[in-house]
Amino acid sequence: METEKIPRMRTAPRIVAEIRALDPESEVTEYCIRQMMKDGSVPVFWAGQKALVNLDDVLALLRIGNHRARADPPTVDGIRRVDVRASRI
């Protein structure tokens, strides 16, 4: 009989502490974790006022990475605006 693994739910500071325990020189910050929570990169479970995230989800996201959405500049009839600074003569 196989038992289901219990999710390791943590707050943002505890996730950073766990990551630092695995890699003391990690550059991952609490701000980074909170941004992942805010932009929906990882699911958040609210327990009252406390936001909990599955540590394994965060580690998986850090392993595979994420792609930054690049906004394409608006075009009019195939022509896009290019901002150019005026040079001083």
Image (tube, helix red, strand yellow):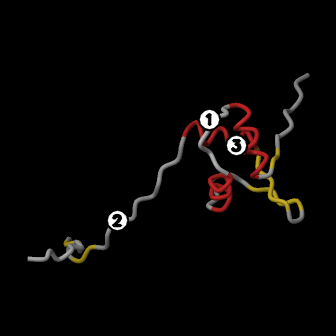
> 70 or 28: which is nearer to us?
28
For label 3, the residue is: 57
Badge 3 local density, few (<14 within 10 Å), some, or many (20+)? some
Measure how far apart labels 2 and 3 are at the Cα level: 30 Å
Check the image and report above or below for 10 versus 39: above
What residue is shown with label 1?
25
Going by the image, does 57 lie left or right of 39?
right
Q: Specify the farthest residue to the left.
A: 89
Judge by depth and name the residue closer to the eye, 8 or 87.
87
What amino acid is at disc 3?
Answer: Asp
> Does residue 76 lie above or below 32 as drawn?
below
Q: Secondary structure at mark 1?
A: loop
**Residue 85 x, y percent position in the rendering:** 21, 74
x 22%, y 72%: residue:
82
- Quadrant including the N terminus: top right
Instruction: Give the side of residue 41 with respect to residue 2, left or right.
Output: left
Quadrant of residue 38 within the rendered picture: bottom right
Figure label count: 3
With 1 as the anchor, is 87 left or right in this view? left
Dot 2 or dot 1: first in sequence order is: 1
Q: Which mark is residue 72?
A: 2
- The quarter of the rendered structure image containing the C terminus is bottom left
Task: Kindly identify the residue that appears in the image at 88 percent across and 24 percent down.
Answer: 2
Label 1 Cα neighbours within 10 Å, binned few <14 / some 14-19 / many ≥20: few
